[in-house]
Image (tube, rainbow, N blue to C red):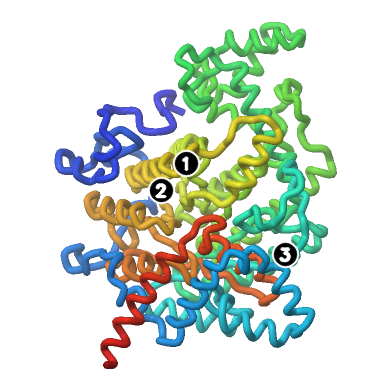
Amino acid sequence: MNKSVSFGISRGYRVISKQQRATSLCILKNHKSAVVVGSYVDIAPSHQGEPSVESTSHSSSSPPTKDLPKLDFDNVRTAFNHCSFSELIRSNLVFRTCKIQPLVKHSRSLVSASYAVLGQNITNFFLKKTFFGHFCGGEGDKELQVEIARLKKANVGAILDYAAEADVEEEHVVPGGGNVMQDHISARFYRYEDEAHCDENAKITLKAIASAAEQGPGGFAAVKLTSLTKPEFLEHVSSVLVETKKLFSAMASPDLTGKKSDEDRFVTFENFKSGIESSGLNLDNICVEKLFKMVDKNGDGQIDYYEWTSHVDPITLSMGSLSTFRRTASLNQESIQRMENMVGRLESLAEAANEKGVHLLIDAEQTYMQPAIDHMVVNLQRKYNKKSAVIYNTFQCYLKDSSSRARLDLARAKNENWIFACKLVRGAYMIQERARSKVYGYRDPIHETIEDTHDNYNSLAMLLLSKNHRCQFMVASHNPESAMLVANAMDEMNIPRVGGGVSFGQLLGMCDRITYNLSLAGYESFKYVPYGPVKEVLPYLIRRAEENGGLIGGAADLEISVVNEEIRRRVLLQA
């Protein structure tokens, strides 16, 4: 590995203002490959001569940009061209209901009462005509294929996810997180039952992969690791990996600036020797030197974070003799068996996705499980992303460490010659993460302001665009400014709208003005399509109501406004 790699862009920077960053494309006029990264402009060299994975040289038969419609998120007619008038009325009613906060707040108990009093058939019928029909693709394969075909007619793909979850009324004890009610979590929580149940979840995801393959090449399916193993196990694996990072930090050369991340630091032989001596372990110089050389893979006399973490066994998490210095032990035999079970399930999904030409999205989860998820995903990417982007990780950009983690994986991909692939989201566990950080007394992992999250999201997207020759990513966002920024940057950087390695995704039933206008303008657009039995998908539906009604995000007003605009347009045309 070349030690000049800095897990990011490390060439000539010049500072720009926030206003300039928001309209970042204006700086491209001076250099064809200038890219905005955070508060800086990077004048990136040509990709020629830089080693890259063969299949990342994107080609496309899409028409020239000048022949495509201009991207306009205010084009309401395009946004709802796929909707019947009755579906527009339903949308209006669904989003207006989301604004009735007492109704949303008590939705779980109200739905439970409906099942008890009116029965399952009547309750399910009502839900399928309202919330379920609006936000979900159906209960089974037949209904799902109808939704997929409808999306395909508008050149919109489907990201398939079986959205059945645990009991909506149950108060869960989240691993390491205390008692947390489900309504404090805006993303899915899986309740572990046993290994057989995890096997069944894997089979369901295999069906989603098969359904995605029927869309043609390039379909997507999504999975959460908590559906494939015990959440407490992921927490334990994460704690071992966190201790591995802490050990590196303790041994690395002092950071006199106080600004360097672990990814930018090194362990010299003297640091290494001193760390072993201070631990009280009595090793002679020959043993210390031999141990150092085992980790210093390129033999340049210093160990960087990439080499350090690469020394971790993917199954046992052992670091050999260095494991002695971690405060958390490597996995015991029972945990190793659980690890092998989980890896086996993941491998079966990855193999199926690879064979069928489907992209497999691994969703992000809580921070105390995310190191384990990252560990699993990177090992899958090493194997399956050699020729094409099969496995996608997910980075939640409201997390302060999301950018450094993405940069580390970019460096791994470059040095190991595989394709980096990810989905960028803003985040789904803010309330729980902040509450947990207060309870346990550690630094809040989330950016202080929404503006910081926006800046981080947009900066990371721009960084990935600058690495387009060896990475692919999905802009999974309901933020029109981020979508427009990336779309315009793609054109300025001559990245093809189709086949260029960049796609866009929004939830079914939300932000149609972004999805369908991106599709009309020739960009690769997708809808996240959850499906499953009505009663089991209820937690997902209730979170959509919370997000749109203001308990979490409050998007209903905008949705009502654009839906009403299209309703008025159609009524006036009929008059």
Residue drawn at (28%, 58%) of the image: 496
> Pointer 1 and pointer 2: residues touching (CB < 8 Å)?
yes
Q: Position of residue 352 (x, y in %)?
A: 59, 64
Residue drawn at (27%, 34%) of the image: 17
Callout 2 crowding tier (Cα within 10 Å): few <14, some 14–19, many ≥20: many
Q: Position of residue 412 (x, y in %)?
A: 49, 37
Callout 1 crowding tier (Cα within 10 Å): few <14, some 14–19, many ≥20: many
> Pointer 3 and pointer 1: residues touching (CB < 8 Å)?
no
The residue that label 1 is drawn on is 413
Residue drawn at (34%, 61%) of the image: 499
Residue 218 visible in image = no
> Pointer 3 and pointer 2: residues touching (CB < 8 Å)?
no
Q: Residue furthest right?
A: 334
Q: CA distance from mark 1 to mark 2?
A: 9 Å
Kind of residue sitting beneath label 3? Val
The residue that label 3 is drawn on is 168
